Amino acid sequence: MLSTALMDPKGSLPRLLDCLQAPFALASRIYVSWVFLKSGYLKISDWDSTLALFEYEYRVPLLSPHLAAIVGTAGELVFPTLLILGLFGRISALGLQAVNVLAVVSYAHVLLQDGFAAAIGQHYLWGYILLVLTVYGPGAWSLDHQLRGRRKNLPDT
């Protein structure tokens, strides 16, 4: 009887869980974005230190330290802002995923050492959340969802 109630898509538990999808997606977007926004803000608020970090500490492949600082900081400010709004949600999540991967690659000489399991674990968690948002989208409480609804209601020309 309990399994039937849980399996019935019109049952109360599935309906309750369906109602939680939009706030869960919003909470996920805010949680993961906040981490990167704080990092981007710190970088832009002390640009000289940021340039020094990219020159002497981070090992960004294929980019000069100055260009890597600009691109990394821009990615940490633009993608999270779009993701919180749910505007270009999947692309924003994918872009932030690239920032996350590049951060791990650039700082792997530290993050992959013994004693840094929690730090690398955070990057894995953020990556997983961003992967879920990329696959499932930003949810009903997003600008993407609102704009898609408006487009459907426009008359054909």
Image: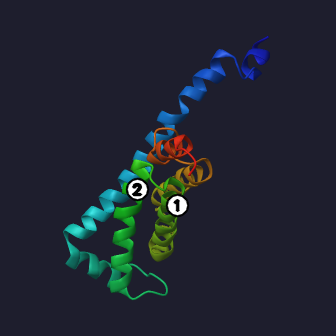
Is 104 located above or below residue 146 in the figure? below
Q: State the residue position of label 1.
A: 91
Answer few, some or many: residues within 10 Å of disc 1's Cα (few below 14, many 20 plus, some between 14 and 19). some
Residue type highlighted by circle 1: Ile
For the residues bearing labels 1 and 2, Cβ distance under 8 angstroms: yes
Tell me the quadrant of the picture where the N terminus can be found: top right
Residue located at (40% from left, 53% from top): 33
Q: Earlier in the sequence, mark 1 or mark 2?
A: 2
Is 73 located above or below residue 11 in the figure? below
In depth, the one of 85 and 38 nearer the eye is: 85
Using the image, tell me which numbered label, if any, was put on residue 23.
Answer: none
Mark 1 residue element = helix
Residue 15, picture quadrant: top right
Using the image, tell me which numbered label, if any, was put on residue 82.
Answer: 2
Is 150 located above or below residue 130 in the figure? above
Residue located at (20% from left, 67% from top): 45
Q: Number of numbered discs present?
A: 2
In depth, the one of 113 and 93 nearer the eye is: 93
Q: Position of residue 131 (x, y in %)?
A: 58, 54
Q: Position of residue 156 (x, y in %)?
A: 58, 48
Answer few, some or many: residues within 10 Å of disc 2's Cα (few below 14, many 20 plus, some between 14 and 19). many
Q: Position of residue 29 (x, y in %)?
A: 45, 47
Describe residue 89's horizontal placement relative to residue 82 as left or right: right
Mark 2 residue element = helix
